[in-house]
Amino acid sequence: MAAVLESLLREEVSVAAVVRWIAHSTRGSEDNPGEAAALSSLRPLRKEFVPFLLNFLREQSSRVLPQGPPTPAKAPGASAALPGRPGGPSRGSRGARSQLFPPTEAASTAAEAPLARRGGRRRGPGPARERGGRGLEEGVSGENLPGAGGRRLRGSGSPSRPSLTLSDPPNLSNLEEFPPVGSVPPGPAGTKPSRRINPTPVSEERSLSKPKTCFTSPPISCVPSSQPSALDTSPWGLGLPPGCRSLQEEREMLRKERSKQLQQSPTPTCPTPELGSPLPSRAGSLTDEPADPARVSSRQRLELVALVYSSCIAENLVPNLFLELFFVFQLLTARRMVTAKDSDPELSPGVLDSLESPLFQSIHDCVFFAVQVLECHFQVLSNLDKGTLKLLAENERLLCFSPALQGRLRAAYEGSVAKVSLAMPPSAQAVSFQPETDNRANFSSDRAFHTFKKQRDVFYEVLREWEDHHEEPGWDFEKGLGSRIRAMMGQLSAACSHSHFVRLFQKQLLQMCQSPGGAGGTVLGEAPDVLSMLGADKLGRLWRLQERLMAPQSSGGPCPPPTFPGCQGFFRDFILSASSFQFNQHLMDSLSLKIRELNGLALPQHEPSDEDGESDVDWQGERRQFAVVLLSLRLLAKFLGFVAFLPYRGPEPPPTGELQDSILALRSQVPPVLDVRTLLQRGLQARRAVLTVPWLVEFLSFADHVVPLLDYYRDIFILLLRLHRSLVLSQESEGKMCFLNKLLLLAVLGWLFQIPTVPEDLFFLEEGPSDAFEVDTVAPEHGLDAAPVVDQQLLYTCCPYIGELRKLLALWVSGSSGRSGGFMRKITPTTTTGLGAQPSQTSQGLQARLAQAFFHNQPPSLRRTVEFVAERIGSNCVKHIKATLVADLVRQAESLLQEQLVTQGEEGGDPAQLLEILCSQLCPHGAQALALGREFCQRKSPGAVQALLPEETPAAVLSSAENIAVGLATEKACAWLSANITALIRREVKAAVSRTLRAQGPEPAARGERRGCSRACEHHAPLPSHLISEIKDVLSLAVGPRDPDEGVSPEHLEQLLGQLGQTLRCRQFLCPPAEQHLAKCSVELASLLVADQIPILGPPAQYRLERGQARRLLHMLLSLWKEDFQGPVPLQLLLSPRNVGLLADTRPREWDLLLFLLRELVEKGLMGRMEIEACLGSLHQAQWPGDFAEELATLSNLFLAEPPLPEPQLRACELVQPNRGTVLAQS
Amino acid sequence: MILTKAQYEEIAQCLVSVPPTRQSLRKLKQRFPSQSQATLLSIFSQEYQKHIKRTHAKHHTSEAIESYYQRYLNGVVKNGAAPVLLDLANEVDYAPSLMARLILERFLQEHEETAPSKSVINSMLRDPSQIPDGVLANQVYQCIVNDCCYGPLVDCIKHAIGHEHEVLLRDLLLEKNLSFLDEDQLRAKGYDKTPDFILQVPVAVEGHIIHWIESKASFGDECSHHAYLHDQFWSYWNRDGISQCCSGWCGTPGLSNSSASASQSAGITGVRKHFLPGILMKCVCK
């Protein structure tokens, strides 16, 4: 392994070759022979390279990130323990600080032996610390988070509520650690010291922050730890808007909220103070070491390693993309080097040269490396949420090391609309009574029905009690509710009663827990729920603030174990407390059914042609629907997995050896609860992986240790591994998976691979799945995978751990390096304006609840109708605005542009500049859109609601429904408009500008002159195609060969030219190519006339066209050329050698017609004299028979000798022949 | 006006290995006086194209080209004014325009060092005056004006017919008060492949629902039906999710045995008689 890295560093092999070598075991054909040879000797080690590389990097960074492995090892055993069950024995945990991927002994070569040796015990405080908690999640967070070592989380106190005890209680009098904030009650601050509300002002260089109006304390960047006094004195005094008092109140309120929230989370997401005490090594100095690009040592080596590392990430050779990003971010934000460990005794002998010296010798190296890697993954970064992008764009180290990357990130930030909010939804409503299923007819007896009704009541009673009490510190689910639940379950005797109850349970589960990011929709103007749409603006702000203050501090690092946050905890505890196997079985049946149903749901597919602005609105609806389905599926699958694997999971360590074999033999008999393998296969085939895989991952995350070893599930894992490898983010193509879809799948799969129960070696031992992972698709090319169904909101909702990246960056900004747990969040002043409007917010909230209650009492169709109307009207409103206001603005833009072009003259100006000028003038008008939109919704919604509701609807209900519909529609439309109107105007104006400029470009003159038909034209002229074909016939006759009896009559010719005139005057059917050909044919015809080559029908004697007729025809042609052709006529062809040569063939030659024609051309201004002279001149160069050349010379002399003013009756013909008494028919 | 399959086959029968000249067309017209010239020309052109497609390769072997070129050279040496090239083409049963192109290409190869580019050749065929050799220019021009199935003039005529029929179709739709989106509007909406017109409100014609109309101003024989079905219609069908479509052909034989299609004359009438025999509707039912 090291040898590979060595040869890479020595530049013996190229990075590309190494990556190919890792990715494709068998094929080395593209490599050059030398490289191939160098690598092929190492073939057996191929599989271990990536784990080696990852461990190597972790190892190297240990001095920089001394608080332990940043990118956590798997939390061993975490999933095995069941939370909330009393009496779980404490387990010795596998060392969390052990290497991420322990190297396998067999493969280690001499070169890597020392590394491997070191690998076992990596860093930080004792890994073998024992943990008392049996909590799924509690335990894990302890391991995941650095700095937790040595501290016990909790004793084995109360079973379900961990009593948060700190081994070393925080020193509250230490102002540096716990600066006073207002009057923080010691309670929460004690357990969670990080929750300081710290209105951090923003330093000047962080230009993206919103302007601050009231926080005037010195910038945080100067003061590493916030100054306590600044909080209480300066900010509140000066320049504070009237709302400042309410701000204080708000803070008080929020603090209460927060403590509530804190107790409320019964699950381990509840922040635990692992990050608690500062490590001794950095307790002293709080200043960060500045990073300087100039002081990077061994730049080249870092670049190489970064390149290999990036390539591995890009090729999905690492198990978890976001884990690696997390690691890189940690390097980026590393604060200082630990100098104490500088001389690592293990690091010297036996290690090859280039690996001998540490890779990261200083902070500069770390940052340089991190920036190198990040540069390769800009695409992923640019798809992160807006907050993360902002933090990245503002990161001064990034700016310092790679201004280019920083610029791109800034641009991405500015263009990003991906605000993500993970606020918890407000507490849930009960499932309303379902008359269609919950009626007597569905029960076997009256008694069963009554029992069910009673149980229903008990269930809701239990639920309410849980809602009221679960936040209280001493409350315990089992103690408080266990017996009641079991008593209730005991009453469910009849099998069918179980199914009824399970249905209720499942519905309630979906209703309460479906969208943990429920409120987030407001950000994109797509609210998943009526409640969140009502007054979404203010309410949404409040929620965002609340989220910032109270969101769970940490979801447990970048790879948290599966959890049951929020309300889900109730259902989990309910299942555990009920411990009824009938209930579990029915629940599994019901969940499986529902999963199948939702998984098979035909979701609207994206129409690739509809990338229009207005369809955004509709498309958002579809995305929303997808999100709802996906989240429901994940929730159901999670519970299904939980219940299905419940019997097999225990706190004891996974069995080994023979015991394992026997268990395997036994378990392989058992059919899976849901045939997930088939569902997965079908999902892949139908290109619906983006729907199927996320829920499958949830399901598998609850599997026990034996499951991955079973053949059935092993197949699934292999499929998933292949899928994972095939999702290379940089490969984007039509019909393939969308970027964010891929990102979601990578995130969930990466997370799954880190779940403790999934064997660590699975990812690497699996033979290179090869690029041959091409699902044989039976499905149409546009499966769900290709549709942009995933947005950042959904991504972060499904994978909250991605948010860890942001926390890491925020931690860096806050300057506090998480001394006391959690990261410091600053409150930007925007929230204070929101807070000023507090009374109205509560009234809005009340309004929302009222509406909710209103719908609850009405038939469901009413709600559907209102939502439908709101959605359609909102969407129509946007379309209407686009067709009216925006179209007007575009017209204005066009006229403005014309003016600009006139004033600026021909060259115009830089189009981009023009666009800027126009947009700056027009975009402000976009503000009208909101007013117009509001008016539109106001006008349209009531009628629609009226029309759709039954006639008999009471007036009060109707008017309420109308009002709600208006409100919702307005909300929807305005949210979209306010977010997008400027961009929309910009886009349309841009299109108009480029259209206008293009039209200006090539033929400015022709544009004005092109005339249509006259108004009176009835379009009865002959069709151009007909004329071309007629003229072609004449030409072919003239050119020959022809039968003796063939010919045209002079009348026919005249008629033809007349028709040509008509056609040219009626432009209806004329297209430019046709006109061009007509012009050319008419010139050819003229040449033939001049040369007297047209065979005339009639008596043989009169075989040739009469002079007078010929002149008349030529006159007609001349006038057509002059008057009727709008395109250029290639008149110079008249004097082309070929056409003049026609004359040579005639005997006797006649020149008078040509001379006549030339004169007329000059006279009518169709050709200039000079032009004709030039043509005649060039004629001389051609090869002619001797006499012809003479005659030609005479002609040109004659023409040239003529005075410019034409004299009538020039006897041109005398030069050749006595004229035949031509009558000049001058019309 | 409906052409029966039998009539169509009779016409096609007459066209086996007939040179694409004015004279042939005239004979055809005499033979089938009831058919309009446009229809006959269209059938002629298509049949001839099929024929050329079959035999194209054999004229393009280097030996064939060389022998044609030598024959041409010999011919013009004997008499430059005689229709050497045209006769040659007719003799070997190849389209005169294509023969002209062959010889021109060969000629340019001989007289210039570099192989002539396609655009140069095309431009010379469009305007033979650019051909450096006067005799060849005349010969080429003669071929082009005498060829009624190939060549720049014929292409232009076809193009013009296509354009005209779109305009006619639009007028008809307007006249019938059918609301539609035309190609430009559809393109503005972002469709990449569009039929000429999408009806905003579908209409039923003789029991077939018509969602869009494509004007194909050429004769719709079995072969071109299949080709267009393959190339265009299915892609519309896929894009628009439309179950039925309809296209106007300039004359379609009643293809009773065509499996996927049934063709009827449809209700769009009133097209000027002097040019079109009437637009026939082709409905593809799926």
Image (cartoon, grey):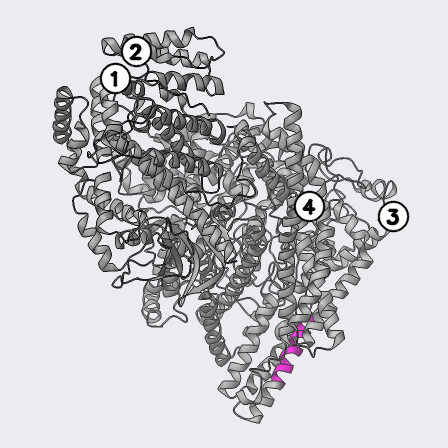
**Residue visible at 39% across and 61% down?**
B266
Q: Is residue A841 toward the left or the right of residue A18 in the image?
A: right
Q: Secondary structure at mark 1?
A: loop
Q: Which mark is residue A824?
A: 4
Q: CA distance from mark 4 to mark 1?
A: 106 Å
Q: Which mark is residue A1216?
A: 2
Residue A956 on image: x %, y %: 76, 74
Height in image: A689 above or below A584? above
Three-letter residue code for mark 1: Pro
Q: Is residue A500 magenta?
A: no
Q: CA distance from mark 3 to mark 4?
A: 27 Å
Say which label, 4 or 1, has the lower sequence index.
4
User: Label 3 belongs to which residue?
Assistant: A242
Protein chain holding label 2: A
Magenta portion: prevailing SS class: helix
- Do dots 2 and 3 share one subunit? yes
Residue A964 seen anywhere in this rendered image of the structure: yes
